[in-house]
Amino acid sequence: MKILVCISHVPDTTSKINFVNGDSEFDTNGVQYVINPNDEFGLTRAIWFQEQQGANVTVVNVGGPDTEPTLRKALAIGANEAIRVNATPTDGFFVAKQLAEVIKNGGYDLVIAGKESLDYNGGMVPGMIAGILGFNFLNSCVSLTVEGTGVKAVREIDGGKETVATSLPLIIGGQKGLVEEKDLRIPNMRGIMTARTKALTILEPVDANVNTTAVKFEKPAPKSAVKLVAADNLDELINLLHNEAKVI
């Protein structure tokens, strides 16, 4: 089984976020980047298939040379090879188009992507890829087993979980639960050294429309000061909740 894991290169949640050029661009200065958490769950599941069923695991990213350390980390975790599409990920459709081309040319059976990236939370790329290629698609996937070409999966739905059966080729949008958080892999020294010798292929992008552009970014409003009300002053509490907070 050939597995492709889509990797997003996203800011660490501890990074301080700022914008430049009239709040129209993200400021990358001083920002530490990591593997998108949803993608990391997917990568760990793919490594399990590699160890238990002999799957070949490739990781792919759409981005510039600055994303290669993230791909190298994925190789250190255990992926067999990596692909970088040499393009700026401008919008969801553009990224999906590039990844669809990689999948089509690579003959992959299973494509594991995070259901959304930590930075923009668009949640659109896996479904778009499936639409372009005509593959089966499952989103919000929290469990996945493969026997031959048959697949059994569990996905989160409103109010519960749904168990479904489908077949390869398949694209999933994975999330926390696909593996347990305690099972996430940390690269060891041997993995880091081995990753240096694994293949990292750079592909030029195919033509694709850029349908959306960012006009302006805005940070959430800072939290207002806390108002304390005496425990016995119920009238004041009701007044603040009704007239100021407007929640009753």
Image (tube, helix red, strand yellow):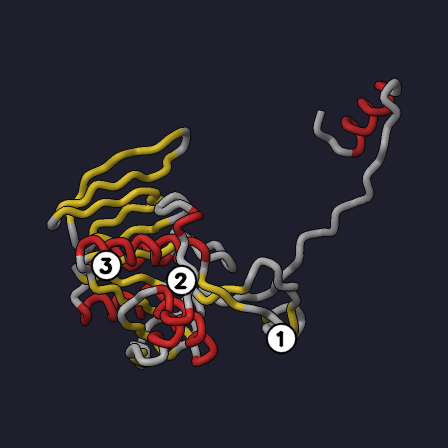
Displayed quadrant of residue 61: bottom left
Report crowding for label 3: few under 14, some 14 to 19, many 20 or more residues within 10 A (C-alpha).
Answer: some
Q: Position of residue 229 (x, y in %)?
A: 86, 28
Q: Position of residue 211 (x, y in %)?
A: 41, 66
From the image, tell me which residue sits under label 1.
Answer: 29
Q: Residues within 10 Å of mark 2 (few under 14, many from 20)?
A: some
In the foreground, 119 or 94: 119
Name the residue at 31% across, 80% down: 197
* Residue 70 visible (yes or no): yes
Disc on the earlier residue, 1 or 2? 1
In contact (CB < 8 Å): disc 3 and disc 2: no
Q: Amino acid at mark 1?
A: Asn
Q: Nearer the viewer, residue 219 or 195?
A: 195
Measure the C-alpha gap from mark 3 to mark 1: 37 Å
Residue 231 falls left or right of residue 28 = right
Residue located 18% across and 54% down the image: 53
Query: Would you say 190 lies left or right of 66 here?
Result: left
Nearer to us of marks 1 and 2 is 1
Q: In terms of secondary structure, where does tag 1 sit?
A: loop
User: Helix, strand or loop at disc 2?
Assistant: helix
Residue in view at x 70 percent, y 29 percent: 247
Q: Give the camera-side residue of 11 and 157.
A: 11
In the picture, measured across the screen, residue 69 lies left or right of residue 242, that is: left
For label 2, the residue is: 92
Per the model, the C-alpha gap separating discs 1 and 2 is: 24 Å
Q: Which residue is mark 3?
A: 50
Instruction: Say above or below: 35 vs 157.
Output: below
Name the kind of residue labelled 3 in the image. Answer: Gln
Residue type marked 2: Gly
Mark 3 or 2, closer to the camera: 3
Q: Secondary structure at mark 3?
A: helix
> Which residue is rendered at x = 21% and y = 53% of the image?
52
